Image (cartoon, rainbow, N blue to C red):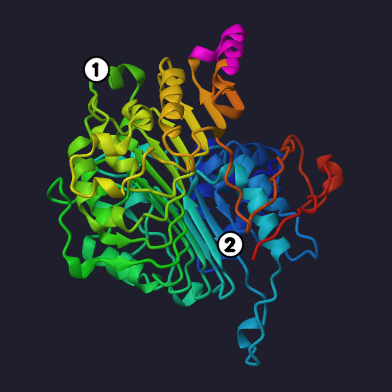
Amino acid sequence: MLASPKSKAPITRLSHDVLQYIFEVGTWDTREMDDSRAFPWLISHVSRDWRRLALAMPTLWTLITMRDNLKSPNYFRDRHNLTRSQQCPLTVYIDLRIPGWEHIIDGSVHPFTESVVQRMFWVLSEHMQRPISMFQLQPSTRLEHFEVERDPHSSSLDLGDQPTDVEAPVALDTDSASALKSLSLTGTHIDWTQFSFANLSRLTIAYLPINMRPSVEILCSTIGKCANRLEYLKFYGAAPVAETAEGDVDPSHSITLPHVQEFVLGYVHPSEMVLLAKLFIFPAVKKLMICDIGRALMTADHRARFPLDGSIDLEALLLGTGIVSMSSVQELAIEGLQLPASPTLALKFLNSFPRLGSLVLHDASPTFVDALAVAPRSDSSTSDSESLPSLTCPLLRDLKLVDMNVAALDAILTTRRSLATLNAEVSARLASISVYGKAFRDEDMRQVAKDTFLSHADTVVLGEHYQPEPSLHEYAAWEIPRYSHATDDVAIEDGDLSIMGEQPLPVLTGALA
């Protein structure tokens, strides 16, 4: 039995530094996780002096087990551990074990419910940047959606030595995620050689340092396993970097993705864009986004001083089979891509999408806007010019410009309408025009511009700042509320919420497939 501080036992004569070291040793790895979990709570309830010492040691509270045997778990201890550990790195165990379940042989599914998973991540939501290790203590054969994000993203693109949490792959194996339908890895990666998730319909790989990216061969093998299921594919600063700007690809490596509806392509090195567009064939894609991440990460001053010319890369892209296979694209977004003053290349690129109905330009070359007022046939030197339409993007109905120079937009759209009069079957009038930029900070200027643009579109939206709509996944459509931390001034009985002065966790609404 531990002695009272008032007694003359030798332990009472130890200095605070020595006691704290003993406390620290007590949290070191043990054979039983429950022992490590209980230890800081035991020593913090021995006496007031020991409690003050324990609460002054953030490293004592860094083990999070997400385990609660109550019918309606409130994760009392874990919430206090998260508060007391301050900003220290965490070790998190997602404990889904049900006593005796592993011995059931009748094929029953794991009995944990959706609300249990929601409550776990409700507790962890404000601390997800701190875990250095995360373990799942029960194979989740029902897991359909898995998303890991490391912050800050941009630091993952550096070419130097990477933090250990980037170098170490996420522990996700096929056996424990055989039902996986959606996988998102941002700033982190998995063991690509073990990738065999054949049921994926959504795949996002973003912000990876070059040495953590899959090779072309491994990427082909990876995507090939789920090629017939994928509907959404996003590579954002995560593709292999080709040795040449032309992004040469062995034709035998090309993969057809017959069901992909949306493709997001973000690149730091332009050869990434060319390589991916040549590597994959998209016969059914409807949405395409191309983003120059390198320019997006620059300051405004750097953009002005170091303009990036993407003409060579765009020309290489147009020579490949990738763009030809994307003729079904109906919505196109371009961010950061810069071209020379002549609209010729932009015109050729836009005419690769004959069904285009929506165009978004964000800090992109103004020649993309200029091309809308050029008659493709008159600007074409190719023998097949007769097959080109009399108007660039004749089906265009929605135009959105963000951080673009729109001084000549009225003249461009007026010229476009004049070209449309040459063909009675073509209409140049737009359904909507949306423009965002500093020029519309003034309300009077916004009103003048709106009156002008209404002659070209049914709806006009003008603003200074552009706020893209948040993407809401159908598998996580709830809002995570905030947790108010309780005070640690007095000793609290585990689970006594009345002393904490707070309510139990609310019931969360939403769906987790």
Give the quarter of the figure containing the C terminus: bottom right
Residue 1 appears anywhere in the view: no
Q: Position of residue 323 (x, y in %)?
A: 30, 52
Label 1 – label 2 distance at C-alpha:
49 Å
Disc 1 residue type?
Answer: Arg
Q: Residue at x 13, y 50 (%)?
A: 243
Q: Residues within 10 Å of mark 2 (few under 14, many from 20)?
A: some
Total tally of numbered discs in the picture:
2
Residue positioned most to the bottom: 106
At mark 1, the secondary structure is: helix
Give the quarter of the figure containing the N terminus: bottom right
Q: Residue at x 44, y 21 (%)?
A: 409
At mark 2, the secondary structure is: strand
Camera-side residue: 510 or 50?
Answer: 510
Disc 2 residue type?
Answer: Ile
Where are the magenta residues, as a range? Answer: 439-451
**Residue 450 on the magenta segment:** yes
Q: Is residue 80 left or right of residue 233?
A: right
Q: Which residue is mark 2?
A: 94
Q: Which residue is mark 1?
A: 305
Camera-side residue: 438 or 267?
Answer: 438
Q: Position of residue 114 (x, y in %)?
A: 70, 64
**Residue 498 on the magenta segment:** no
Residue positioned most to the right: 498
